[in-house]
Image: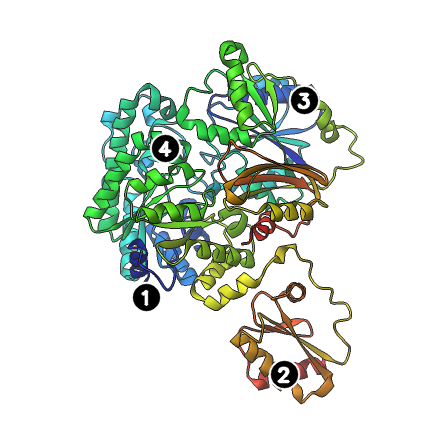
Amino acid sequence: MSIPLHLVTGFLGSGKTSFLKHFLKSFEGKGKIAVIQNEFSEVNVDGPELRETVSYDLLEINNGSVFCVCLLGAFIDSLADFIKNKQPDLIIMEASGLSDPIGVGQIFQAQKLKGTVFLEHVWCLVDACNYNRIPALKLRMNHQLRTADTIIINKVDLAKLKLDEVITQVQEINPFARLLQGEYGKVSLDGLKKALSFYLAEDKSLGRPDIASGVIRSSREISLVRLKQFLQEMKKDCIRTKGFVKIEGGRMVFVQGVFDEFRIEEHRHFVGPAELVMIGNFDRTKNLQIVFDEYVGI
Amino acid sequence: MEGFKLLEKAFHLEELERVPWVPFVGVHGGKLIGVDAESYLKDAEKLVAGISKAVELYHPDGIPVAFDLQIEAEVLGCKLVWSKDNPPAVVSHPLSEGVELSSLQLPKETDGRIPVVLDAAMTLRKKFPDLALYGLITGPFTLALHLLGTDIFMKLFEDPEYVNELMEFCSQVGSKHAEMLMNAGCDVIAVVDPMTSQIDPLSFETFVSPFATNIFEFVRSQNKYSSFFVCGHAQQNIEVMCDCKPDNVSIDENIPLDYVKNVALAKGISFGGNMKLTSVLLLGNEMDAKKETVACLEQGGNKGFVLAPGCDLPMDTPVANLQAVAEIVYDDYARQVAKKMDHQSTLEPADLNGHFETGKVVIDIITLDSASCAPCQYMVEAVKKASQSFGDRVMVNEHKIKDVDGIRMMLALGVQNVPTTCINGKVKFISQIPPKVEIEEAIKNELTE
């Protein structure tokens, strides 16, 4: 049984903790939700006010800038123990504002975690008021936006004048994500409730599929032909694929696949390494990164 | 050749017969001697024991004395939270809690854990005179972030003068710490500034370049070498990092090695990296580590390249994976074999049903190709010769890993090295060509079983 994990990213002050609270309240009573948060995050989710209204298990991690690639290894054991002891139905994790957003997905390939947890959804919060305020950090924010499944333009009540501009810019960076607008981290999660009812339904007699996820990263180019061959090979086990891949000539393509259908589109507004999230029922003996590397030609 | 001399040649961009290898052993050294991260980083004797063990196991050309970017921050008043399997984390930022920048003092040899690292460096210097010792200092921007917290990002625009003043102080701290480490015997000062990956090149040039450059100039004035470490998505800053004139830039897996190679060599600077830390070195197996090493060595080339992991090795990195890296570094033949092992992870092991026969001995030799590889040829010949006297009771098969069936057989038999001889499905002789009598003995044992 594999537990879906939702990752909440967004730069410092974008409203991640408010969103987390809103998320917890929206699903109150519908299943066992666990929260993972950096113990020293700017705003701690854990407080008497929230504890009174919602019940949840909390795993705190104290790695400073959580999910720096160097520190991921040590997180494997604590996450495996947490899952074993608490057996949540869903995990929501707040990434540190300076983190490398989906790096954490790499550790789900560890033997201890394979088949226990998978990266189901990535939320990214954007502070509509301050989006353009810190140009020095634009590259980092863009990276977080690019890896998101859903982008929440937050604090729209405070940013009425600039909102269209922010939306246009965000859509240019990631035209593929779902876009929502929020105030104080509050957005409509109705669509999500329906999607998650599968995991949170009280009748679990049918069990949940044995799903895993992998995050593939590569700074090397792969030819379009080899990329297609790789996707072709993976499709029998893959439920969903999403991400950006660098192909020959340094061009970037967006890859999106559902079961055995996938599409590849060129995306001009991005330079950087490939990041591909794959969710599916993979052979546990295989390391998806290594399989991808082999197609790259390593 | 001694490690330091090899690295020196790499820094001078000379063509090399072998690429130098620098495993960034931090708290992983604690794992090697069975102690947790906290005890390890607080004790000079343990640091020496951990690094000595790493030298014995991994045969490096250079190695850091300690990998801990919190040493200066701790001395300057940041609170740390310790962990059993990670370096400590900074959890308080004095400059955002009312402490004045002007009240902060440059560190001394006796402050905090500085003497622990200096003691370890002095002992290691005596113990390993030819090894390049890396002394790590916290890069000025990362130290500034430790001291001020994330407010620094807003201050870059709201109060650039203050940021400049803070960066000046942090670079003085860096130079002072570098001086102590060099006096203790370090050959290379690594300025580790991961948080610069957060900012764009223009901000880097304004707020980081002048201060980082000062440190590199100081190191050069002391006739020592320097390396600029960055990790994360920092491709945008490689050029401006090189412009700070370190002797080397070192990067992680997020930046293409060929890109760094082109930029660095064009500016006359050596470069290093970028083996994948988590997905390969920590979570992969020996063959994955070997293939990753081959890929890096081929991209890096023989001029100016230093093979290293992307960052501080995770504590639990399997020893066998790092030994596999060392094997590829030192052994050209092992490199050829690893290269041939194409598409291993996507293949299913061969089906061994019907492969063995009762009353007969089946010998399988896994080779690169006995026609072109000398050790493989000798192993096949030796086994065939030793089998002759047993007639048709012994069957000898060669499986070349140049083709898919050979690799599938290798997987089925659980073979890790080439050439390897298996008798009735059991691995018997690895790499070494056994004497005829030993092979005969092994066959006899199987026939009588």
State how far apart marks 2 and 1 are (Cα): 39 Å
**Callout 3–callout 1 Cβ contact below 8 Å:** no
The answer to whether residue A166 is above or below residue B74 is: above
Chain letter of disc 1 in the image? B
State how far apart marks 3 and 2 are (Cα): 70 Å
Q: Determine crowd level at label 4: few under 14, some 14-19, many 20+ residues with C-alpha closer than 10 A.
A: many
**Callout 2–callout 4 Cβ contact below 8 Å:** no
Q: Mark 2 highlights which residue?
A: B384
**Callout 3–callout 4 Cβ contact below 8 Å:** no
* Dot placed on the residue nearer the N-terminal end, 2 or 4: 4
The residue type indicated by label 1 comes to Met
Chain letter of disc 4 in the image? B
State how far apart marks 4 and 1 are (Cα): 39 Å
Q: Which residue lies furthest to the bottom in this view?
A: B389
Chain letter of disc 2 in the image? B
Q: Mark 1 highlights which residue?
A: B1
Residue at left offset 46%, top offset 36%: A63
Q: Quarter of the image containing the C terminus of chain A?
A: bottom right
Between residue B34 and residue B381, name the one nearer to us: B381
**Front position among marks 2 and 4:** 4
Q: What element carries label 2?
A: helix
> Is disc 4 on the same chain as disc 3?
no
Q: Mark 4 highlights which residue?
A: B201
Residue A46 seen from this side: no
> Is disc 1 on the same chain as disc 3?
no
Q: What element carries label 4?
A: helix
**Front position among marks 3 and 2:** 2
Q: What element carries label 1?
A: loop
State how far apart marks 3 and 4 are (Cα): 43 Å
Q: Mark 3 highlights which residue?
A: A27
Between residue B179 and residue B27, name the one nearer to us: B179
Chain letter of disc 3 in the image? A
